[in-house]
Image (cartoon, helix red, strand yellow):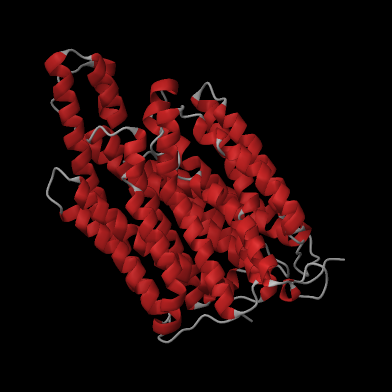
Amino acid sequence: MARAPGEPGTGDRAAAPDAGRWAMLAVLCASLLLVAMDATILNVALPSLIDDLRPGALEQLWIIDVYGLVLGGLLVTTGAVGDRWGRKLLFLTGFVLFGLASVVAATSHSSGQLITGRVLLGLGGAMVMPSTLSLIRNIFTDDRERALAIGIWAAVAGAGACVGPLIGGFLVEHFAWQSAFWVNVPVVVVTVVAGIGLLPEYRAPQHGRLDWPGALLSVAGIVALAWGIKHVAKGSLHPGDVGVLLSGVVLLAVFARRQLRLDDPLLDVRLFRTGPFTAAALATLLAMLAIGAALFLISLWLQYVHGYSPAEAGLRTLPSALAMLAGSLSSPWLMHHLGVRAVLAVGLGALAAGFLLLALAPEPTTYPVVALVLAALGLGDGLAITASASVLVSSVPVERAGQAGAVSETCYELGVGLGVALLGSIHGAVYTGRMTGLPLHGSDLDTARESVGGAAEVAEGAAGDTGRRVLDAARAAFDTALTTTAYVSAGIVVAVTLLVVLMVPRGFKVTGGH
């Protein structure tokens, strides 16, 4: 029979020594680092990948963001599976799949195989991630100790997204783009072995059957919503694309209605009636949408507009990682002294300030400005993600910690994917619109207008003055599109910041949950 979390037994973490608890946290963070890193590690590897596999503009976007979309779409379902079948079992099975998927991606000889590998990576990651926050909720019963553990969790998650370009750049420059996937394999092996020995098994005291129709609704709804946003944001108002977008909204509405009728739902949507819970979910989604899109676009800007190598470009994204660490580790102290609402407001405000700085900076944009932007985005992300995760896991009963973790990580991964899909598509549409008056014809013209990577490829093959004109036009168009996207991003952040502040009561404190 499944043992309730916190019930005495071999898996009871309240009775474990401190060293045991922190060793378990280290295992969880190692897996989280790898899963988070894979969301952005290909950003600086994309030019090398384009040269090798020659994917189209839409394939490029899918290669980057299908991982986060699949992962985000499946987290609710896999979180429920882990609650019923065991979080340790799900964690280990998912990480083994993650390692096998890395091999599939690393051996790709076509865009289709690479996208398939990324899909499998997303599936494996979706099986791993629900275990992290829910186990932290079980392992750390003291409020302040849990807040510190969540701060470390958020720092690792954010650092993974931020150092992905840095590690990816080093690997690509010294080896090849395939090494961005091969690096996963030894980490998976070590973590699985450590997890078998260290992690206990936890199951929620639920005995209902898994709601497979609901699972299908949630996955289909999220994928349809993301697909629709991707195409509509790119400027396509084709009835089919609009229909897919609307069908995603309808499917998710049906999913929510179905969950309200179940005694043992995949996701208790009543949790969203609580203002702080909903505000925390929105803040996580927004923070990762911002940093995901920014790292993707700025990595391309560093390589194509300024001509940095992958390793040089990755190194220049380091301000975001350092600021993320500072924000995540300082957030528990700030929440204790200033309150949750103040920390969320400052964190989201830093995101808005970063985008406004990027939008208002004179063109051509210089790297010192971009470094300040990255630092502001990293600091804001660190503060917002840590505060949001603390609110989510502390606002629910302990037996629903898995659901809270699934909500947090769904918003986290879906935010990265939607950031690239939505803001990347807006950037691409503006870029294409600015690529006019080029001395090109036919397929070369289409390729140059499709993406900055395509323009660089055409310019390299063109002769003398024509190549220079194409490259100059592409760099100017990319810079202008970056400015426009920053304005849009700043507007979104400001609007959501006001909403989040209104939803969190003054003086709201993080507690041990119900």
The quarter in which the C terminus is drawn is: bottom right
Please indicate, yes or no, whether residue 286 appears anywhere in the rendered image: no
**Residue lying at 36% horizontally and 36% vertically, measured from the top left:** 311
Q: Is residue 245 above or below residue 455?
A: below
Residue 435's image quarter? Answer: top left
Q: Residue furthest top?
A: 463
Relative to 22, 66 lies left or right: left
**Residue lying at 50% horizontally and 56% vertically, measured from the top left:** 157
**Residue lying at 43% horizontally and 48% vertically, measured from the top left:** 163
Relative to 157, 26 lies left or right: right
Residue 453 percent location from the top left of the image: 31, 29
Residue 228 percent location from the top left of the image: 44, 45
Residue 462 percent location from the top left of the image: 21, 14
Q: Is residue 5 above or below residue 118?
A: below
Residue 180 percent location from the top left of the image: 50, 35
Please indicate, yes or no, whether residue 74 appears anywhere in the rendered image: yes
Q: Nearer the viewer, residue 302 or 4?
A: 302
Q: How many numbered markers are drawn?
A: 0
The quarter in which the N terminus is drawn is: bottom right
Q: Residue furthest front?
A: 19
Q: Is residue 407 above or below residue 69?
A: below
Residue 269's image quarter? Answer: bottom right
**Residue lying at 25% horizontally and 63% vertically, measured from the top left:** 353
Q: Residue furthest bottom?
A: 507
Q: Nearer the viewer, residue 291 or 229?
A: 291
Relative to 451, 284 lies left or right: right
